[in-house]
Amino acid sequence: QVTLKESGPALVKPTQTLTLTCTFSGFSLSTSGMRVSWIRQPPGKALEWLARIDWDDDKFYSTSLKTRLTISKDTSKNQVVLTMTNMDPVDTATYYCARTSCSSTSCYLDYWGQGTLVTVSS
Amino acid sequence: AIQMTQSPSSLSASVGDRVTITCRASQGIGNDLGWYQQKPGKAPKLLIYAASSLQSGVPSRFSGSGSGTDFTLTISSLQPEDFASYYCLQDYNYPWTFGQGTNVEIK
């Protein structure tokens, strides 16, 4: 079955770089049509889509965070890594990764990890 | 970026009620919209994709409709396990954007 799990530091200091890893099973990012997205949710607030990487290494980013985000994949390890530079307390959130599937007309996030809470504080 | 406006932001309803949540896009998005349910402390769960397609395993009391700019999620008969937050997500173009969420509470 498809599973995803996020890992990374629970606490980072302002201005530091955050590195999060999504480790998944049940599918391969070397298979045509496979994709993984990152989404975050500040405490008590709405979801925010951050980035997506595809099987062919196409990458897509949030417009407002594009200069701070990098998404990459390690197909051999079944992992997707998201880095976010210059962290600020407003970046405190639960970060999720999700498998992204696409039909002929639409894409959707069909399997999600449990999320990992990242707090930005000195 | 396309703005997604959900309404209401919260509602109170009773078990058995018919519940409708709407999502309006700031520009036409075809049928490139999904609906997600989130319970406290849990990851979101996909309910509906492509505006009206029911995800496998999701109860048939959930349905989605709409195209262009106006979309609706309907729960035909609210069950105790449906009390949660609901979000729409447009995948028409980048960046993908979520609505601000609707919290469905017990009346």
Image (cartoon, coloured by chain):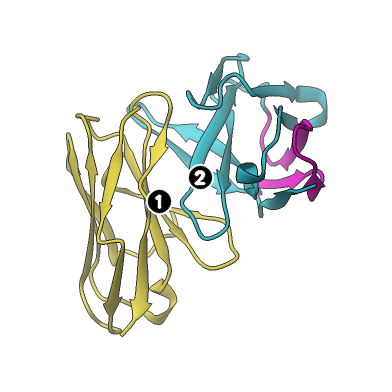
Chain colours: A cyan, B yellow
| Chain under callout 2 | A
Q: Is residue B4 left or right of residue A56?
A: left
Toward the viewer: A75 or A9?
A: A9
Looking at the image, which residue is at 56% across and 29% down? A51
| Chain under callout 1 | B
- Label 2 belongs to which residue? A110
- Mark 2, residues whose alpha carbon is within 10 Å: few (<14), some, or many (≥20)? many
- Bounds of the magenta segment: A1-28
Q: Label 2 amino acid? A: Asp
Observer able to see residue B51: yes
- As displayed, is residue B100 above or below residue B14? above
- Label 1 belongs to which residue? B55
Q: Is residue A12 magenta?
A: yes
Q: Label 1 amino acid? A: Gln
Tell me the distance, in whole angstroms, between the alpha carbons under discs 1 and 2.
8 Å
How far across and down, in percent of the image, does residue A33 sit? Answer: 53, 24
